[in-house]
Image (cartoon, rainbow, N blue to C red):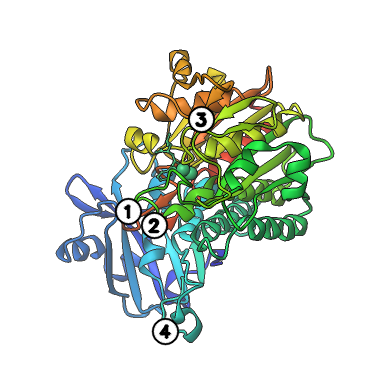
Amino acid sequence: MTALTLSTAAAAGLRADAIVVGVAKGAQGPVVAPGAETVDEAYDGKLAATLETLGATGAEGEVTKLPAPSGFKAPVVVAVGLGAEPGEDEAYTAESLRRAAGNAARALAGAQKAVFALPLVEAADAAAVGEGALLGAYAFDAYKETAKNGNGKAPLAEVALLGGKPRDKEYKAAVERVVAVAEELNRARDLVNTPPNDLNPAAFAALAQTAGKEHGLTVQVLDEKALTKGGYGGILGVGAGSAAGPRLVKLAYQHPEADKHLAFVGKGITYDSGGISLKPAGHNETMKCDMAGAAAVFAAVVAAARLGLKVNVTGWLALAENMPSGSATRPGDVLRMYSGKTVEVLNTDAEGRLVLADALWAASEETPDAIVDVATLTGAMMVALGNHTFGIMANDDAFRTAIHEAAEESGEDAWPMPLPEHLRKGMDSPTADIANMGDRMGGGLVAGLFLKEFVGEGITWAHLDIAGPAFNEQAPFGYTPKGGTGSAVRTLVRLAELTAAGELG
Ligand code: BES
Ligand code: MN
Ligand code: ZN
């Protein structure tokens, strides 16, 4: 991944491919943001005017390249829009810094090193710029010929944050944290982007085992035999149609002084064809993304371990491939779940809730202080909240609010959603304890209500439906690439941090 350093050197003397400066939308046109004073002086104080001539306004997403002033070792200055200039007593928000840094990093693909001279007032600003740069520089080119022959544009290799204080403890810690989180988040993106013929449940489990052990986690993998013996009817039922059998992976990070225990549960459908209730063409091309919840959980547990957080975190990856075949679960089949409840499968495309139900019950057996599940669960949530926002449902209003706040602090768009009890009766089944489908209206909430039935009595639980933001099919923006986005990773890490600090639960 891109290397991140703090630098106090003067911009002019730095050997780099580009100097990145910020430009904001002022009342009278573009203004150069703090951090780039010396660059502006080298242009005789005319940088803002020059940028205006070139059509720059300071709007978010804008990238303007111009030749560096004479005497600079770097050949190019890249001016990135920061949006509206903050008022007298206000500062640039963390998210505006992240996005600007991300836009700059993307515009600099193919370059080796860039110096970022963006406004840094405190360590948190360095973290925001660093995070935006590391996440924005991400590219997935493992399957491209150009990655091998060097003809493609490799991601920006090195970012130096100008004005960061390399000897300051707070700055150093902020950069270390952001590097760990961004590396794991980018790993989650890689997992989502990896084609489903290469990332089946066994492959995902093997990878989790290797990487988990590398970071001191205890990893347990239940294969088909173990799942059968244990009675995991939900995971087995979903995996029954695939030649690549299902897995349940448990990753445990333990801190010797922890007094809280969080469990994260991820939906890991490595490919969702819909099963016998086959998805029509046009709806399955991106369904390799259906393991994004498990990828986020995996990344967050590893990040918690790398950060040495004083909290125990257990990650559960419910892995299966949802395929139609002669051995597949049929609409009408009844599954006996790990919890003992029976489920009538009315639609094999509502498979995520089935694998999650077993994993939620397994997680509940350890009676953690809270469980958070993450899943690309319903198209209905995308209809409700769009492509950038995940829905938060919970059996505890305060916990739901805390997660919403954690998301906001991390730069993730999320919104609270209800779990209306009246939708439960739509899942009544004449044959089994519950059906895996209910009313079409409010489909995201129906799925949440289903999951709720598989959470152990008295355990605080929340469900994040990331179907919208997990996979970006549109153009990249800010620090969000096309494809896998790493949705929910930062929120989960923040939750673990808050729990470790005793500020949650
Ligand atoms: N994985 C899908 C949900 C999804 C759709 C995620 C689009 C990302 C993008 C899920 O398994 C699914 O198929 N859900 C069904 C449920 C329905 C059959 C009750 C849906 O939302 O249509
Ligand atoms: Mn499905
Ligand atoms: Zn699915």
**Label 1's element?**
loop
Badge 4 crowding class, 10 Å Cα cut-off, few under 14, some 14 to 19, many 20 or more, is: few
Q: Amino acid at mark 2?
A: Glu
Instruction: Tell how many labels.
Output: 4
Callout in the foreground (3, 4): 3
Residue of label 1: 282
**Quadrant (top left/top right/bottom left/bottom right) for the N terminus:** bottom right
Residue of label 4: 151
Callout in the foreground (3, 2): 3
Residue of label 2: 285
C-alpha separation, residue under disc 2 versus residue under disc 1: 6 Å
Relative image position of residue 309 (x, y in whole percent): 72, 42
Q: Amino acid at mark 3?
A: Asn
Relative image position of residue 63 (x, y in whole percent): 29, 63
Q: Is residue 183 above or below residue 504?
A: below
Mark 2 C-beta to ligand 1 under 8 Å:
no
Q: Of the residues under marks 3 and 1, which one precedes in the sequence?
A: 1
Q: Nearer the viewer, residue 194 or 7?
A: 194
Badge 1 crowding class, 10 Å Cα cut-off, few under 14, some 14 to 19, many 20 or more, is: few
Q: Is residue 306 left or right of residue 259?
A: left
C-alpha separation, residue under disc 3 versus residue under disc 1: 24 Å
Residue of label 3: 436
C-alpha separation, residue under disc 4 versus residue under disc 2: 28 Å
Q: Amino acid at mark 1?
A: Gly
Q: Of the residues under marks 4 and 2, which one precedes in the sequence?
A: 4
Q: Is residue 194 left or right of residue 18?
A: right
Callout in the foreground (4, 2): 2
